[in-house]
Amino acid sequence: MSPHAAAPRWPAWSVLVALAAVAAVAVFSLARYPANLHDPAAPLGLVALGALVAGYLGLSVRALRRPGAGHVPGTLIGLAAAVAWSVELWAGGPARLERSTEQALGATFALLAVMLTVAAGSVAGLSTRSPGAAVGAGLFAGLVSGVTVFCFAVVMTLTNLDVLAGRDDYRHQFATSPSHPADIATFLVGDILTAGIAHLAINLILGLIGAALGAAAAALLNRTTPGGGWRTRRPRWTNR
């Protein structure tokens, strides 16, 4: 039996389904607010989105063909991180909280999201002593949180445009935007698409940082004896 046969494939399938949702949400947003395509930064944004989706797709297809032990815990931790990011986005958007509460809540949950994403690979590496499990967990924490946050952020904005347009800070950003968007709805959708693209990159990078740390920790632990002591050479004088 293949060593990968026992590992479930649903984490990879879930990312592939979410990627289809990312593409659908992005296409719908640009079709509904096509003026964003005239923004000078639009070509760069589209190239970045295409490259990230292609990268996510390649990693997910590879994981589908070679499922690993760390994919399930990475997926679960990635979902938890996405929830934390979503709270941060909600607090800074349609929640319309007091400024001090908004900043405190946003900072707390953003920090929690970062810690969770990085921790996935580290925890897997320390608990299993398997570099492969650490890489799988970190990778999927980044993939899952990235696609989930993108979808949540854009859908949240599309369904709360009236509320967001009433915020003084967003109205000021719209009025002073160097790209001179056609209207505030166009500005808000373009802004959240840019933020979503950034999250696709940032969340994956955070997951891979955790993967590297976890793999290094697992390799270090594997240098110890089963009893936990270091494998060191006995001094020659002890052989007398």
Image (tube, helix red, strand yellow):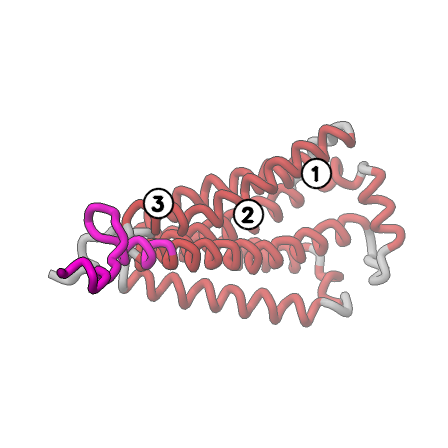
Looking at the rendered structure, the kind of residue marked 3 is Pro
Mark 3 or mark 1: whose residue is earlier in sequence: 3
The picture places residue 209, in percent across and down from the top left corner, at 48, 57
Circle count: 3
Instruction: Please give left or right for residue 142 compared with residue 90 in the image.
Output: left
Instruction: Please give left or right for residue 137 compared with residue 238 in the image.
Output: right
Picture quarter with the N terminus: bottom left
Check disc 2 and report the residue beneath it.
149
The picture places residue 140, in percent across and down from the top left corner, at 41, 53
Asked if labels 1 and 3 touch by Cβ distance under 8 angstroms, the answer is: no
What kind of element bears circle 3? helix
In the image, 4 versus 237, the foreground residue is 237
**Is residue 204 visible to us here?**
yes
The picture places residue 172, in percent across and down from the top left corner, at 87, 46
In the image, 192 versus 91, the foreground residue is 91
Check disc 3 and report the residue beneath it.
73
Check disc 1 and report the residue beneath it.
92
Looking at the rendered structure, the kind of residue marked 1 is Gly
Closest to the camera, between mark 2 and mark 3, is 3
Magenta part mainly helix, strand or loop? Answer: loop
Picture quarter with the C terminus: bottom left
184 up-or-down from 205: above or below: above
For the record, the magenta segment spans 217-240
Real-space CA distance between mark 2 and mark 3, rounded to the nearest whole angstrom: 18 Å
Real-space CA distance between mark 3 and mark 1, rounded to the nearest whole angstrom: 29 Å
